[in-house]
Amino acid sequence: MAKAIIAGLLKHGHSSQHILVCAPTQATRSEMVEQFNVRVHQDNCTAAAFADVIILAVKPFIVPLVCEELAPVIAQHDGDKLVISIAAGVKQNTISTKLGDHQRVICAMPNLPTAIGKGLTGLYAPKLSQQADVDTADHLMRAVGDTVWLQEESQMSTIVATAGSSPAYFFLFLEAMEKAAINQGLPQATATKAVLQSAMGAIAMAMDSQHDFAKLRRQVTSPKGTTEQAILAFQHGELDALVANAMDSAADRAKELSLG
Ligand SMILES: NC(=O)C1=CN([C@@H]2O[C@H](COP(=O)(O)OP(=O)(O)OC[C@H]3O[C@@H](n4cnc5c(N)ncnc54)[C@H](OP(=O)(O)O)[C@@H]3O)[C@@H](O)[C@H]2O)C=CC1
Ligand SMILES: O=C(O)[C@@H]1CCC=N1
């Protein structure tokens, strides 16, 4: 995910030399230099000392360990650092506490399309956050897509389910459609093109349209026609319940991760 954000930031004109990536393995650091020409370091504390803004992009269970490691650096710099975590489920207060009661912590939940500047990031900042920090986090994540600010931290698990994880659901749907088209007899390349172009057209229409999604769906669905049969099959398979169940599962997992 860090790669996706870096790719988006560079695309948006941020200087690669203002980004310092910290990763324990040489292979990842070399890849980062090769791919993005960013600065790299193996030591989190050295990297944190360099930064005005620290983005925590490690797995959720590693976040507390990294925060404990960084706490002395944060204290040394009189709290003069903004910390943004993108880890699913890890609470703002957990990070703040592990950093030695450092208050300047904002939680963000981006998604993979940040890599091409089309991400969606949900953000949460505690009520007493400095406006400058809110603006910085918003500015950074807007460089890689759009942002939504959450009033309550409890809404973050829904953003994980709706935006963080959801590109995978759409990819899964594309995979399933491509497979079905091939099984019905289309060559792979034709199936891929038909699925992709249709998905892109539908999304573009939904973005442009004043109509809600259901109205657009009805525009495709001629009475007694072909689409109606497909929609009936989806309804018979209880698509709404299946999607709700999948999103509940993602949100529940985010809540579980927040318990450590
Ligand atoms: N993937 C996604 O679409 C999204 C992910 N996220 C969140 O992003 C975070 C990262 O996920 P993802 O990118 O998928 O995971 P990855 O495993 O791909 O990346 C994690 C990175 O953390 C580095 N790392 C591991 N241990 C340390 C450490 N002690 N100090 C510093 N760096 C370390 C690893 O470096 P090395 O390669 O050297 O081992 C690796 O590059 C997670 O918290 C996830 O919840 C949020 C939104 C979307
Ligand atoms: O699957 C995950 O846990 C991460 C968080 C959101 C997207 N990927």
Image (cartoon, rainbow, N blue to C red):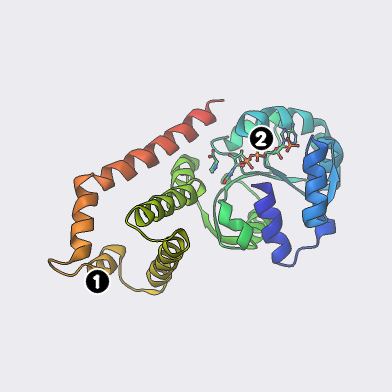
Judging from the image, what secondary structure is the residue with disc 1 in?
Answer: helix
Q: CA distance from mark 1 to mark 2?
A: 50 Å
Q: Amino acid at mark 1?
A: Gln
Q: Residues within 10 Å of mark 2 (few under 14, many from 20)?
A: some
Which of the image's four quarters has the C terminus? top right
Q: Residues within 10 Å of mark 1 (few under 14, many from 20)?
A: few
Is 219 rendered above or below residue 136?
A: below
Residue 22 appears in the rendering: no
178 or 244: nearer the viewer: 178
* Residue 225 falls left or right of residue 210: left
Instruction: Please tell me which residue is depicted at 46% across the width and 32% down the height of the picture.
Output: 253
- According to the picture, the residue beneath numbered tag 1 turns out to be 219
- Residue 105: x and y in percent read 66, 42
On whether ligand 2 comes within 8 Å of the CB at mark 1, the answer is no
Question: Which comes before the other along the chain, label 1 or label 2?
Answer: 2
Instruction: Please tell me which residue is depicted at 41% across the width and 70% down the height of the picture.
Output: 201
- According to the picture, the residue beneath numbered tag 2 turns out to be 96
- Residue 151: x and y in percent read 48, 49
